[in-house]
Amino acid sequence: MKFSSIAGIITYRIVLVLLCAGVCFSPVPAGALSGDCDNSGSVSITELQSGINMFLGLQASAPCVDTNGGGVSIAELQQTVYDYMGMLPAAKQVTGVVKDPVKSDAVISGATVKVYLEGGSTPVKTVTTTTSGTFSVAGLLSGQDYTFVFSRTGYADTSYFNVNPSHLSDTPLEPVRLLQSALMTQTADINGYIASAETNARLSGIMLQFRAGIGATTGELQPFSRSTDSTGYYSRTFVPAGVYTATVIDTSGGDPATWRTLGHFTVYAVPGVNFCNNSQNYSAVTGIGTPVYRAVLSWGNSPVDLDFHLTGPVAPDDLGTTIGDPPQPRFHIDNSQIAYPYGSAQADLPNVPGALTDVYLDMDYADHGNDNGPETFTILNQRAGTYKFYVFRNSTTGVLGTSGAQVRLYKGAVLLQTFDVPVQSGTTWHVFNLDGDTATPVNVMSNVLTSTLAKRVPGAPFDETTLFKEIVKVPRAPRP
């Protein structure tokens, strides 16, 4: 390798340093290459030099190297070097947890996790879950596809396909639920909704096809499929016990040649365990519609019931909704008033917004205490002013700070920010504020009460964060 310029010598030395910082194992498989800015299928020395210049701040960053938009990191530059050399770096750990859904998602210790190269028959790694049900696998290759097989005495094996570890950070897998062997001759009924990731609108005419295992995007189809109805709802009875990957297909074109695969998600059929079977929902990226803001709340098993609350600017012609002292024109919606303007959305599930709806709350279908969310606020018509997002512990027991509550903010299908509940005392979490396109984290825990934040009566002498009326929810029966 010859270099006739100072820049070339610098490039060569940086390449050597980065190669020594990691271990190269095997040729890179086909796919997108870091630094391949001209999409030629390879990384040239000129493109490598450009990547180094981006890292040094001598050239504006480009998405072909700066994959997360935060400036070229040493790890991203290292990946460009590996792709230039045609080699693979070592991946960081793959992590996860194994649970028993029949025992309210109790963790399973002592489960065996075998790792295979995709299509291989001999495991390259074998680990065992800890007393907390967790596992971690190190020493894999970035850019390679692996299959993880989970087993435990008394349980049916479960396969997790298409695991592609990253060398930039640990790769967390979704929780794996093992089904007890005694259940495998039984069936369960499953249901859920398919919605647009851009607008949160429910999607009709979506076909779901199923394959066994997690992450199973190819291979043998199961002998059952389902399509969503006019409200985006799907259901299937007598599904053999197991874990499946549902492929989401837009069939609106009529001709199968025009069908589009919109994504994949995991579906469980667990006899007698409704929190697994009900509300198995999916938000599909359709590429249609104007992206809107969505805030999605989810949480763990305890407390069993958290509530999502939102206050925001009212419509110019609304003279009857005020909060605060002195009174300020702001609305408040939660599970008792699911939309603003009040009454503009269908009160019964599936909470379909009306033509005049600004904001609405889309609640989970199954009863609280079992499904643990999600609850989603969708801002269809954003007005000037500040929107404030809160989470309240509606359960009489449990600790909000250790609930695992998380709020994810999307614009369309793009995840903008993730907020994790602070591990602090309090029953109310003020999560963040949204003003225009600026989301400002607040992350304040307190014991203020938030469900009656807004009143329709002008001049109501209530401050936004000083009054609360606890709401007792009536569990929802599964849809017939």
Image: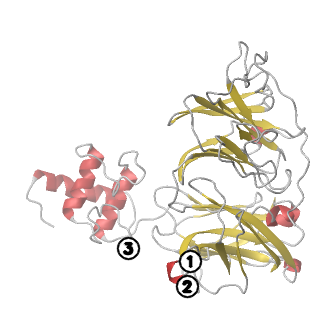
Which residue corresponds to mark 3? 28
Which amino acid is tagged 1?
Answer: Val
**Kind of element beneath mark 3:** loop
Place residue 89 in its image quadrant: bottom left
Left or right: where 60 falls relative to 450: left
Image position of 62 with respect to 190: above or below = above
Residue 460 coordinates in the image, percent (x, y): 79, 18
Which amino acid is tagged 3?
Answer: Val
Which residue corresponds to mark 2? 120
Spatial distance from mark 1 to mark 2, Cα to Cα? 9 Å
Which residue corresponds to mark 1? 124
The residue lying furthest to the left in this view is 4
Pointer 1 with pointer 2, Cβ within 8 A: yes
**Kind of element beneath mark 2:** loop
Residue 166 coordinates in the image, percent (x, y): 49, 62
Image position of 301 with respect to 343: above or below = below
